[in-house]
Amino acid sequence: MPSNTPEEQLVKYLTDAYSIEKQALAQLKIAPKIAGHPKLEEIFKQHLTETEGQERLIEQRLEAHGASPSKIKNAVMAAGGVGFALFAKLKPDTPGILTAHSYSYEALEQASYEALIQVAEKVGDGETVQAARRIRDQEIAMKERLADCFDEAAEAALEAVGNDDLDNQLNKYLADAHAIEAQAIQLLEKGQKIAGDPELANLFDEHLEETREHQRLVEERLTERGGRTNSLKDAALSLGAMNWGGFFAAQPDTPGKLCAFAFAFEHLEIGGYEQLKRVAERAADGHTIQMAESILAQERAAAGKLELALNRAVEASLQAQGAAA
Ligand SMILES: [Fe+2]
Ligand SMILES: [Fe+2]
Ligand SMILES: [Fe+2]
């Protein structure tokens, strides 16, 4: 089915937004139960209410474009195959993982609404532009509230396992970081093939090099700390159990989605290293604190560049779909 007019593209982006909110609702309903800290619990509850409003807004915009409820439902089910939905199926089970994933999910939402704004502007649909801007601002605010809870999340995560075994815990965080970098390498390697324009490809290339260095640094740290080498394999396996495999099997297939995914993934890494840094502080491991800080600076810089590249990536996607006006 060719879907190449700007209007049809807009309905597609609205449908994606709708399915993202559906997944967000499912996550936000369970999040307060595993938050592990009253401050975190509170912001999840608050964002659940906001998200219910967002879902209604997007549903109204879809209806304004003649998308019937059953059509929307089918499209949401189809979206399960495009990867956005899979991202939300990760089952975080600790306050730390929950916070990092939620932080990254808000970034995914932010990027998705940036794209929606761009497409709605093209079509001249002012009401959708307005709705999408309002929702985007709520996602950014939630992202910032989560970043404001990194201390509490690390505290709750350590409490959950008992503070007596900090060195062992820190080695586990390092092994997890190693596995996350391995996934980042995969994403960035595949990313280059569908980047869609040389500038974007270059951006992925640059960060791929940094990412390989991150992985090397983390492994070196783990070895210096005398961490077991097989803990690297364990971490890779536990990530598999968290459904990362499914996430990466559903590769984003357009430059716009790729850029949004990569932006979200940088936030997952930022969330992860923020936790790692706090555990290293508790364990008074200065070298690991330093390493986490220098990697964090590069992840933040990469996220910033991806944010700036998003409009161009969405434009490249629209061009490819024949919808560029
Ligand atoms: Fe949302
Ligand atoms: Fe959100
Ligand atoms: Fe990264």
Image (tube, rainbow, N blue to C red):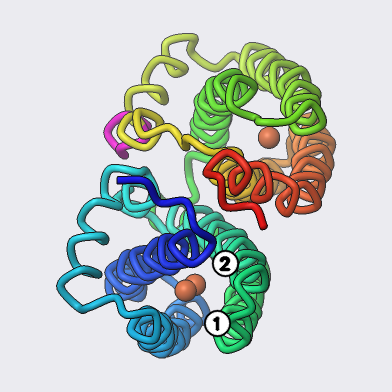
Q: Position of residue 160 (x, y in %)?
A: 39, 56
Pick the front one: 307 or 98 = 307
- Which residue is the site of mark 2? 116
Give above or below for 313 relative to 158. Answer: above
Label 1–label 2 contact, CB within 8 A: yes
Q: Which residues are magenta?
A: 239-244
Q: Specify whether 162 is left or right of 213.
A: left
Amino acid at the residue labelled 1: Thr
Q: Main secondary structure of the magenta part?
A: helix
Task: Write down the quadrant of residue 319 in the picture.
Answer: top right
Q: Residue at x 73, y 30 (%)?
A: 197
Disc 1/disc 2 C-alpha distance (Å): 8 Å
Pick the front one: 297 or 112 = 112
Q: Position of residue 24 (x, y in %)?
A: 37, 68
Q: Residue at x 20, y 68 (%)?
A: 71
Q: Specify whether 233 is left or right of 171.
A: left
Q: Earlier in the sequence, mark 1 or mark 2?
A: 2
